[in-house]
């Protein structure tokens, strides 16, 4: 059974257009709705596996509605502050800055490059186990290897990626 985050990510990708329209109805503009949908994706990535989410679709739509409502409230507060002539001391946002997005994209590019350096079998095991979220026994069965081999390949891949990202950060 896939993790909550994996299942919600797949559902979000399948329902993206509907979720975007839902957010747009709440916040009023397409750019704001796209921001909400992006925030939804980031939030879904941080969902824990415990407790398991039974109705993932309802959970995802409730989360999207809540994020859109929060976004709308924040925009209204910001407008109110600026309309009153006062300058805001600090405006908090869940939306990452352009710099953060750029750094994250670069980190992802480096991670993809590190994964490409791995032997094919090791890369397959890591992708199935850590990215696709398959249980170890399913990975073992699918690739015709033992559970110990699955664990070994994941360990090698994680160490390799960590070392490569650390090397790049130090350079």
Image (cartoon, rainbow, N blue to C red):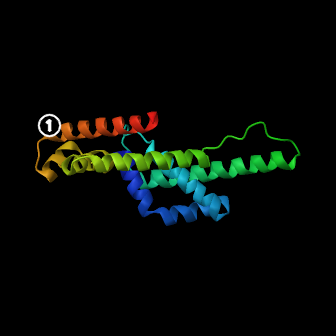
Label 1 crowding class (10 Å Cα cut-off): few <14, some 14-19, many 20+? few
> Most extreme residue toward the front, as rendered?
171
Question: Percent from the top left, x then y, of residue 23?
Answer: 59, 59
Is residue 163 found left or right of 156 in the rendered image? right
Above or below residue 56? Residue 147 is above
Going 59% across and 55% down the picture, which residue do you hit? 35
Going 36% across and 50% down the picture, which residue do you hit? 112
Is residue 67 found left or right of 167 in the rendered image? right
Going 50% across and 55% down the picture, which residue do you hit? 61
Return the residue nearer the eye: 63 or 79: 79
Q: Which residue matches tag 1?
A: 148
Return the residue nearer the eye: 157 or 4: 157
Question: Percent from the top left, x then y, of residue 6?
Answer: 36, 49
Question: Percent from the top left, x then y, of residue 131?
Answer: 33, 48
Going 58% across and 50% down the picture, which residue do you hit? 67
On the question of residue 96 being in view, the answer is no
Helix, strand or loop at label 1? It is helix
> Most extreme residue toward the right, as rendered?
85
Question: Percent from the top left, x then y, of residue 96?
Answer: 59, 46
Return the residue nearer the eye: 29 or 97: 97
Above or below residue 54? Residue 168 is above
Is residue 26 found left or right of 105 in the rendered image? right
Above or below residue 110? Residue 156 is above
Image quadrant where one finds the C terminus: top left
On the question of residue 130 being in view, the answer is yes
Looking at the rendered structure, the number of numbered marks drawn on it comes to: 1
């Amino acid at each position: 059974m896939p993790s909550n985050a994996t299942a919600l990510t797949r559902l979000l990708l399948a329902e993206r257009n509907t979720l975007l329209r839902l957010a747009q109805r709440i916040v009023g503009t397409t750019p704001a709705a796209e921001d909400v949908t992006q925030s939804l994706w980031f939030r879904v990535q941080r969902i824990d596996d415990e407790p398991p989410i039974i109705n993932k679709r309802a959970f995802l739509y409730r989360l999207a509605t809540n994020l859109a409502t929060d976004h709308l409230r924040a925009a209204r507060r910001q407008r109110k502050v600026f309309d009153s002539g006062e300058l805001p001391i600090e405006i908090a946002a869940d939306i990452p800055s352009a710099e953060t997005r750029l750094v994250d994209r670069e980190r992802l590019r480096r991670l993809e490059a590190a994964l490409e350096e791995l032997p094919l079998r090791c890369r397959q095991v890591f992708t199935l186990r850590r990215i696709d979220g398959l249980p170890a026994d399913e990975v073992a069965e699918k690739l015709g290897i033992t559970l110990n081999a699955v664990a070994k390949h994941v360990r090698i891949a994680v160490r390799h990626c960590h070392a490569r990202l650390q090397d790049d950060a130090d350079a």
